[in-house]
Amino acid sequence: MTLSSKTTGETQIITVDAARIDAAMAIQFKEDMRTQTADGTGRIILDLSAVEFIDSSGLGAIVASMKQIGNGRRLELAGLQPVVAKVFRLTRMDTVFKLHPNLDDALASELE
């Protein structure tokens, strides 16, 4: 799994370059997220547009990442494929995370 990061203003964008976040990748995902978010401040957008599948371990890894970034920082999700979005709805995690249809909408929402 590869995570890439860039900063736009006060927003850090982390892109997941993998088709799956599952049990085999969950631990590495959490470690990579910890590394990517260690020095930042403010808002984080996790771009999941390449992710086609997520299981409970992957969902747990995203929740754990949200918790480890701490107070005062937001983790928002963008670009969820229909199958991934369904997992968030079924587990009611769509009420925990702010979900955006795509990265452009996520970035535009900061301006509102």
Image (cartoon, rainbow, N blue to C red):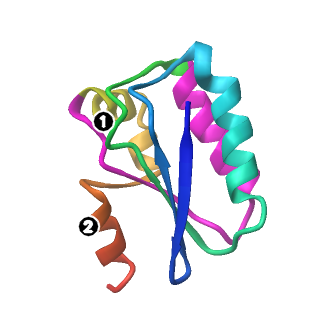
Q: Which residue is at 28% across, 29% downward?
A: 86
Query: What is the x, y in percent for residue 6?
Result: 53, 65
Q: Nearer the viewer, residue 65 or 37?
A: 37
Instruction: Please tell me how crowded label 2 is: few (under 14), some (14-19), or many (20+) other residues with Cα within 10 Å.
Output: few
Q: Nearer the viewer, residue 17 or 46?
A: 17
SS assignment at label 1:
helix
Contact between labelled residues 1 and 2, with CB atoms less than 8 Å apart: no
Instruction: Please tell me how crowded label 1 is: few (under 14), some (14-19), or many (20+) other residues with Cα within 10 Å.
Output: some
The answer for how far apart the CA atoms under marks 2 and 1 are is 16 Å
Query: Mark 2 or mark 1: which is in front?
Result: 2
Q: Label 1, on which residue? A: 85
Q: Nearer the viewer, residue 12 or 85?
A: 12
Q: Which residue is at 77% across, 66% downward?
A: 39
Q: How many marks?
A: 2
- The magenta segment is 57-82
Query: What is the x, y in percent for residue 97?
Result: 46, 51
Please check the rendered image and state whether residue 107 is part of the magenta-colored stretch, yes or no.
no
SS assignment at label 2:
helix
The vertical placement of 86 against 8, above or below, is: above
The amino acid marked with disc number 2 is Asp
Q: Label 2, on which residue? A: 105
Q: Based on the displayed image, in which of its 4 quarters is residue 5 positioned?
A: bottom right
The amino acid marked with disc number 1 is Ala
Q: Based on the displayed image, in which of its 4 quarters is residue 108 positioned?
A: bottom left
The reply, left or right, for residue 31 in relation to residue 18 is: right
Q: Quadrant of the N terminus?
A: top right
Query: What is the x, y in percent for residue 72?
Result: 69, 72
Q: Nearer the viewer, residue 76 or 2?
A: 2
Q: Quadrant of the C terminus?
A: bottom left
Earlier sequence position, callout 2 versus callout 1: 1
